[in-house]
Structures are given as C-alpha cells and as structure tokens.
Amino acid sequence: MVRNDNPRFLKLIHLDLPLLLGLLAVAGLGLIVLYSAGQRNLDLVVGQAMRLGLGFVIMLALAQLPPHYFRLWSPWIYLAGILLLLAVMVAGDISKGAQRWLDLGVVRFQPSEIMKLAVPMMMAWFFAAKPLPPRWPHLLGGALITAIPFVLIAEQPDLGTALVVGCAGAFALFLAGLSWIVLLGLAGALGAVIPLFWTFVMHDYQRQRVLTFLDPESDPLGTGYHIIQSKIAIGSGGVYGKGWLNGTQSHLDFLPEGSTDFIFAAFSEEFGLIGGCLLLALYFFVVARGLYMATRAPDTYGRLLAGSLTLIFFIYAFVNSGMVSGLLPVVGLPLPLFSYGGTSLVTIMAGFGMLMSVYSHRRPLAR
C-alpha cells in the first residue's frame, strides 16, 4: 500500500508537507535577505511577498488537478507557446536590446516563460506512449521538440531561458532511460557544434560574457565588474559573515543587481560560508524531495514530468550560485524564490504545483 505521511489537512488539499516546508524556508529566508540587499526598502519586500503569495496560490490550484489533465493539455500548451514565440519575433516589444515581451494591453509578459513548463510537459507526453529506453527515431523527435523553442528563445536573445528550456528537454531524455553510451555520444555531438553555436547563434555581448568568465580581470571596470565585485562580496563575508544588515558591498552599491541576479553574493557577505552552505543545503533538500516524489509517480508521464520540473529548479540554483561565485559565465538566471522578480517565480511555483499533483493523486495499491 502506498503510504502518505502528510497531515490529513494537507492530504485533502494535495500538498506535500516536507516539500512545502522546504519552499517556505527558502522563500522566507529570501525575504529577510531582500530587505537588507534592497537597502531596507519595505515596499520591495512587500511586493516580493505578494508575488510569493500569488505563486503559492497557483501552486495550490494546480495541485488540485489530477495529472491526466496535464497530459491532455500538454501538446496544446506546447503549440500555444511556440505560436506566442513566433508572435514575439514579429510584434514583440524591444527592451534593453532584446525582443522578448508581448504587450496585450492588459498584460505584458514573456512567452518564453511558458516553455519552461511546456517543454517538460510535451517531452513527458511524447515519451509516455513510447517504449523505453527510447529508440533513435524517438530521440530525434524529442530533440526536435526541445530544439524549436530553444532556437526561438536564443534568437530573442535570451540565453538564460534558452538554457533552462534546453536542459528541461535533456533531463526528460535522461529520465526516459538513455544509456551512458548514447549520452556520451550526444555530449560529443554537442561539443562538435559549439563552434557553430558560437559563430552563428551567440550575440556579441554573449560571447563577451564567456570571455569575461575566463578572464574577468581583463576589463575590471567594464564587463568584468559584476563578477569581480560579486567574488569580493562573497569572500569578505568569511566563515561567519558580517551579520544581517551589515553588508558593505551591496549597501554601498559596489555590488550590482544585489537584490536580483547577485542576491546570493549579498547573502554570503552577511551570513558567510556557513550561511551559504545552509542555503545550498535547503536547495538540495527541495531537489532531493522532488526527485523522491518523481520516483513515486504511477506512470511514465508523471515520472518524466515531475523529475524534469524538479531538475529545472536545480538548474536555476546551480547556475545562479555558480555564476555569482565565478564558476560559470553570467547568463542572467535568478536564484529561485530568492531573487526579486515575479515571472520566473510564478513559473517555478506552477511547476511545483504540478509536481505535487503527480505525487498526491497516486492511487493506493490494494493490500
């Protein structure tokens, strides 16, 4: 018999207690740090709290839906997302040199955010009815499902979101049971096309970000400024940190984007190595719980969808923490549930709503 150790009330509303507590802990800690990183701007914290509240409401609403609805809607959501990306190419708003937004008058949004959910949904739908591990024709189909939105988003340009979408498709392939030989072959093929990607797909500023990652000191007051100041902030925190509200790099405006992309650096300055490790442990707990829930899914669709959505959350945390510490190039991905902002936060919470739906709607086996 499938056990569910959640309290009765949470069972009734289809929420998983350990995952919920993990998400609340990360979000609550994020609000505390945002108050300091945002120069004690209470309006900033209230706005973020409202976005978090909206995200948790969306998570709760999606958790109530049985997973077969997600499976039924998967191809239509994917198709709608592709059409919206094409609409962005034709009539999208241009801001800061990027054409990523659609303005419908009432609302202005990024259709690329939809694809963070639509791609894992479509990949799970595609492989659910196929024999696993997938054969080569099915691998090509899955690669095409991922490649179309990846290219459309990269052309906006939005390399960070394109990276998340590409990883979502790769995770679904991995969870579908690819052998290590095939995975190594695909990795080799990817390495072979990197020069073409560098030459024909990446924009000048994206190439500069990679070069800056390799040698940030080559332009310390220009392209290398962000990452240099971020590493100074992290290093100056030491083991125990300077204490809450006592950060200097962020409060004296040396650290750019201290409340958004580089909030992990602001956090590490105030809470030190110990605080940074504890935060990463919280993220690890959320990812581990999500993967455990994925293994309990009753069918292939649920397992692939839940696993891919969980690993997308991992990519956010891994890339952002690596980016601000100088281990990865700067690609503009926020720290999930921590960085100030609304669109990606709502998308992440919607993904956790689907994850909880898959886990909580399992049917108990007979004794």
Image (cartoon, grey):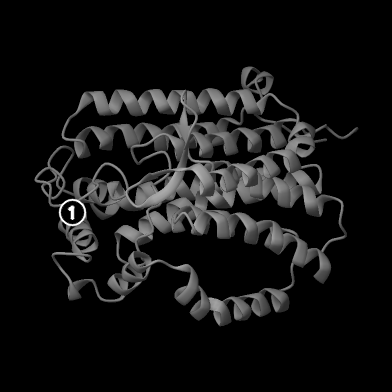
* Count of all numbered marks drawn on residues in the image: 1
Residue bearing mark 1: 237
> Can residue 134 be seen at all in this image of the molecule?
no
> Can residue 102 be seen at all in this image of the molecule?
yes
Residue at the image position 23 percent from the left and 32 percent from the top: 35
Judge the density around disc 1: few (<14), some (14-19), many (≥20) Cα neighbours within 10 Å: many
Residue extending farthest front: 90
Q: Is residue 245 left or right of residue 126?
A: left
Find residue 62 and report its image quarter.
top right
- Name the image quarter holding the N terminus: top right
- Name the image quarter holding the C terminus: top right
Find residue 6 and report its image quarter.
top right
Residue at the image position 40 percent from the left and 66 percent from the top: 203
Q: Is residue 189 above or below residue 172?
A: below
Residue at the image position 75 percent from the left and 30 percent from the top: 361
204 and 310: which one is in front?
A: 204
User: Residue 70: x percent and y percent?
Assistant: 73, 35
Q: Is residue 179 left or right of residue 87?
A: right
Q: Amino acid at mark 1?
A: Gly
188 and 60: which one is in front?
A: 188
Residue at the image position 31 percent from the left and 32 percent from the top: 31
User: Residue 74: x percent and y percent?
Assistant: 73, 41
Find residue 142 and report its image quarter.
bottom right
Residue extending farthest right: 366
26 and 59: which one is in front?
A: 59
Secondary structure beneath label 1: loop
Q: Is residue 312 above or below residue 231?
A: above
Q: Is residue 87 above or below residue 191?
A: above
User: Residue 231: x percent and y percent?
Assistant: 22, 61
